[in-house]
């Protein structure tokens, strides 16, 4: 989505009502090549519409620097909310997913709240630059994070945060049951930036032994190319989110894969989901709320868990979510 489209889209809804506010939604899915960011954005947009009924949301990117048009839009906003994804880390400027130039940083300073964000990987140290950036951006906001590890990291630098888990799980039921008999088909994902041909081949072969049909959703921009290098006979569904939703819609399917938000999307459709952890994101959310996550090593015990039809029982922190929404409403109005 280009800048002009963003401007047009959000100018349509602006009214002259004096009680309305304009909030910049810092959205990692804008200009993203990872369709999983769209799954996060879908949940964030719905929750923000509910939490801030008197706000007009202006979508702005985090994965690219602001254009001139986007800077103009940002100047019209009173506050900013960054929603979802593992956008925080302790190694700025060597690694940063949130593209901030000096002008944008100054505009956002002390005016940003987080919504279910996470910390990138496990890091033993946070350098002084990172500490300064996050504290100056977030210290006055109403912050929610997706796991206890991220809350601890922010707390160590003096930034208060509520652990609400990821917005993609907020509307999931406490328990989802599945048919006793496994379906014939499974949807699978891998992760192009965590290539491991031996592991991923083992996953494909294991699924082929247990299901009549194995279909792959290429969530990342390089997933298809990577997998075709492993096995040219494997079958793909389309790369768009609607393709994945259509495949999940039949319900006569399981999901197994390394893509966290694809696994959560499957649960949103009531589909049996097994998420294989390749980094801290799935592991930490699973520890907090019981998301169905296992090691990607796939031992015999792991395969028995894949084959099990036990319900997905989740402990979504609704009280914390409600508290954060209440705080967000107060913060946005000040």
Image (tube, rainbow, N blue to C red):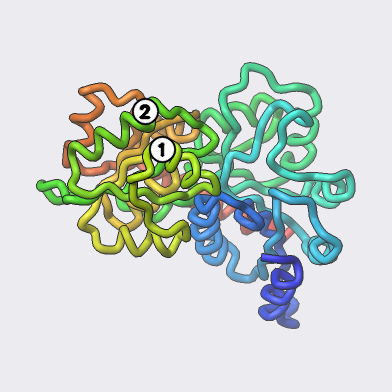
Residue carrying label 2: 296
Label annotation for residue 258:
1
Q: Quadrant of the C terminus?
A: bottom right
The label number, if any, that marks residue 7 in the structure image? none
Q: Position of residue 240 (x, y in %)?
A: 47, 60
Q: Which residue occupies 43% across, 64% down?
A: 242
Left or right, 51 with reference to 256:
right
Tag 1 secondary structure: loop
Q: Secondary structure at mark 2?
A: loop
Residue 176 in view here: no
Measuring 31% from the left and 58% from the top, which residue is drawn there? 248
Q: Nearer the viewer, residue 323 or 11?
A: 11
In the image, is 267 to the left or to the right of 239? left
Of mark 1 and mark 2, the one earlier in the sequence is 1
- Evaluate if marks 1 and 2 touch, with contact meaning CB atoms under 8 Å apart: yes
Q: Residues within 10 Å of mark 1 (few under 14, many from 20)?
A: many
Q: Is residue 130 left or right of residue 117?
A: right
């Amino acid at each position: 989505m280009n800048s002009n489209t963003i401007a047009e889209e959000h100018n349509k809804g602006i009214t002259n009502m004096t009680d309305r506010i304009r909030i910049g939604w810092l959205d990692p899915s804008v200009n993203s090549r990872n369709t999983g960011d769209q799954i996060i954005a879908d949940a964030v947009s719905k929750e923000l519409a509910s939490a801030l009924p008197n706000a007009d949301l202006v979508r702005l990117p985090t994965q690219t620097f602001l254009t001139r048009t986007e800077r103009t839009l940002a100047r019209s906003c009173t506050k900013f909310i960054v929603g979802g994804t593992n956008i925080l880390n302790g190694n700025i400027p060597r690694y940063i997913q949130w593209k901030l130039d000096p002008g944008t940083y100054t505009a956002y300073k002390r005016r940003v709240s987080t919504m279910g964000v996470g910390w990138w990987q496990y890091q033993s140290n946070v350098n002084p630059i990172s500490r300064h950036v996050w504290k100056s951006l977030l210290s006055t906001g109403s912050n929610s994070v997706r796991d206890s590890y991220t809350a601890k990291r922010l707390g160590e630098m003096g930034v208060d945060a509520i652990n609400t888990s990821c917005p993609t799980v907020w509307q999931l039921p406490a328990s989802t049951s599945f048919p006793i008999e496994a379906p014939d088909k499974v949807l699978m994902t891998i992760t192009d930036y965590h290539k491991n041909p031996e592991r991923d081949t083992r996953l494909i072969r294991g699924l082929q032994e247990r299901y009549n049909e194995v279909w792959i959703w290429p969530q990342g921009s390089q997933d298809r190319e990577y997998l075709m290098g492993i096995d040219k006979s494997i079958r793909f569904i389309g790369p768009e989110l609607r393709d994945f939703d259509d495949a999940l819609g039949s319900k006569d399917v399981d999901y197994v894969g390394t893509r966290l938000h694809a696994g959560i999307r499957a649960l949103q459709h009531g589909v049996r989901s097994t998420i294989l952890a390749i980094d801290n994101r799935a592991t930490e959310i699973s520890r907090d709320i019981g998301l169905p996550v296992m090691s990607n090593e796939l031992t015999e015990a792991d395969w028995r868990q894949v084959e099990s039809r036990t319900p997905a029982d989740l402990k979504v922190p609704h009280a914390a979510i409600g508290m954060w929404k209440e705080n967000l409403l107060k913060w946005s109005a000040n």
